[in-house]
Image (tube, rainbow, N blue to C red):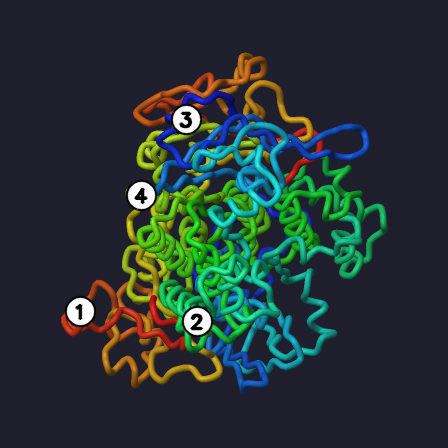
Amino acid sequence: MTTTDPQPAQLSGLDQSPDGDPTGEPLLQVTDLKTNFTSDRGRVQAVRGVTFTLDRGKTLGIVGESGSGKSVLARSIMGLMPSNATRTGSVRYGGEEILNAPLKVMREYWGDQMSMVFQDPMTALNPVMRVSKQITESIHEHLDVSKDYADESALKILESVGIPEAKRRLRQYPHELSGGMRQRVMIAIALACGPKLLFADEPTTALDVTVQAQILDLLQEQQRERFMAVMLVTHDLGVVAGRADDIAVMYAGQIVERAPARTLFAEMAHPYTEALLQSIPKLEMPNHTRLQAIGGRPPDLVNPPQGCKFAPRCPYAQDKCREVEPPLEEHGTPGHAFACYYPVNSAEGAEALARNRAAHVPAANTTDPTAVVS
Amino acid sequence: MAGIGTAHLRPPDETLLQVEHLVVEFPAGRRGLKVNAVTDVSIDVKPGETLGLVGESGCGKSTTGKAILQLPPPTSGTVTFDGKKLSSTSGESLRRLRTQLQMIFQDPISSLNPRRRVEDIIAEGLSIWQIGDKDSRSKKVDDMLLTVGLDPAVARGRRPFQFSGGQCQRISIARAVMTEPKLSICDEPVSALDVSVQAQILNLLEDMKERYGLTLIYIAHDLAVVKNDSDRVAVMYLGRICEVGNPNVLYQQPAHPYTSALLSAIPVPNPEVRPEDRQSLAGEIPSPVSPPSGCRFRTRCPRAEEKCAAEVPEIRPIGDDQFVACHFPLSPNDTVPPTEVVGASTSGATVG
């Protein structure tokens, strides 16, 4: 996924160093990352071996349903884990291994090198702290600057995220702001120290479509200006389609398909990716068109099924899929990897689908005991 | 936008619900200020029809839905349901009518009582009204759970937290349909759900509609979601109606600049469509405490002129089953200029 880095038109004033990776290593390199949680029911395998790299100035879209492990992946990389979590594998940031680094070390990274924009701005912001304090908090933590300088930076950053009357807003509390404004404040906090890597975990799910478009535009603009790497986590393929350079589709804690955005849509190979796309209502469809929902639910990550984890819901699934898990491998176009024996738009896939249809195999054998109908 | 008038209403004898000149105001602060949540909204629904009610947060769409159910009763205006004026009904007779009117809420998990079993939640309407005996109610619960796609043997004894968001929404739908209401109001039933689950619930609503002959008012902020289930769509902005029409026409040829802006905000799952090329709506919805004069959308509208500040536009027919409240509606060949500068800053407090 390494390509020539475009020269940014203008870097943000906070960080003028070009890349900070004399070794030529990517900014973020995740290798076989696994995250488990211990629970009363047993070990929850939330992330089950994820590998990818992300360069500065690039956007990686992570797409999947609730429970696919996409948020846990972002938090595992950043090290925001509860005490019942264990992580194995490797996370290298700018060439340094940061997986399982002590809290003291991670605090140096948080805010300064990498930060996160959370889904729900109301619960992520501190309700009893003024906006100004929430922004300057991390500036004081990482930079040895005067109070006036920090306040001045907070004002600038708030203006740069498109908040009108920024000076007045600084003195307000989160409840005095609308949902879109709160998310802009969240972004301002995340950007305050000029991080090189930004995680956006469903940044627009709680917002209206019109505000969603504004916030996504803002993230994109800030990324270009600051030449950041962005990991955009969402359940909606529509959100990442025009905005991500690369897209990784996650299912049951693994990446099942990964490709540059254009390739993914043009040469979609994994049945899960296809199913996600088909479930989006399209404006071109006349009203009362039946949507192609994905039956059932994601598998239980305490006892994931044998073989391909999507097989129980997959219209293409054959016996082989239920026995041996397909590996994530590159096929065809460089950079396009998927984990499927019977990919969409292939001869094998068409044959498998026809065979299932002929045998009237239900499109979804659900793994969920309470659901009988898809 | 955001106009007044009743040109889009159909003859009262054809409709199940007729809402005329609905106004909902709430007091704001001590200085006699008021929140103009809904200002002169008129809508109607025919039996068996689904009306989609669309707009941003703060446009008054949920308030309209609740005012229809008299929760609380509107400040003024009439709500006629099945020939009876709800606005002049109260007490026991209103309570009796409420079995015919049900609501499905946005957040499926918090709208179900966490301490009760699913069977009790679903049967509650029947128990209250003593419809059937215990056995027949129990049988009805089983049938309804099966209809909404849950296994009665497993589901009925469980409590809401043991289910996912999508399953809780199925339970909510089961509960709402149990008393066989004539009208159900769905307030953003899928906005808290993933796209994949959203499709399941939208399909389920369509099935339930067919099976029980439901009449629905479907409230949402996402035009794409509404289109699928609706026979008619009404777009609202800051307490007023902008445009009403058949979804197939309205989506293809929006006449109101706001409808057009809402449509272009929908993320398209196509990497060739670059979001930055599309016109996006700048700014935020103004405060309903002091809404703009004239057309309420004018502060963010790329087509606004002096007339828009002076006169409130009245709803008028503009095509076959399409009505718009705009002085300068879009014609089919119009392209809207980008709204980069207009209304980038909103005056006063904003309400999300």
Q: Amino acid at mark 1?
A: Arg
The total number of labels drawn is 4
Q: Which residue corresponds to mark 1?
A: A357
Q: Circle 1 marks a residue in which chain?
A: A
Q: Is residue A91 above or below residue B306?
A: below
Dividing the picture into quadrants, the one containing residue A19 is: bottom right
| Closer to us: A238 or B320 | B320
Mark pair 4, 3: CA separation: 21 Å
Residue at x-position 77% and y-position 37%? A168
In whole angstroms, how far apart are the C-alphas of marks 1 and 2?
40 Å
| Residue A254 locus on image (x, y percent) | 43, 74
Q: State which mark lies toward you, 4 or 1.
A: 4
- Residue B68 is situated, as x and y percent measured from the top left of the image, at 53, 38
Tag on residue A287? Answer: 4
Q: Are marks 3 and 2 in contact (CB under 8 Å)?
A: no
Task: State how far apart marks 1 and 3 are (Cα).
Answer: 47 Å
Q: Is residue A361 above or below residue B228?
A: below
Q: Could you tell me if residue B278 is visible in this image?
A: no
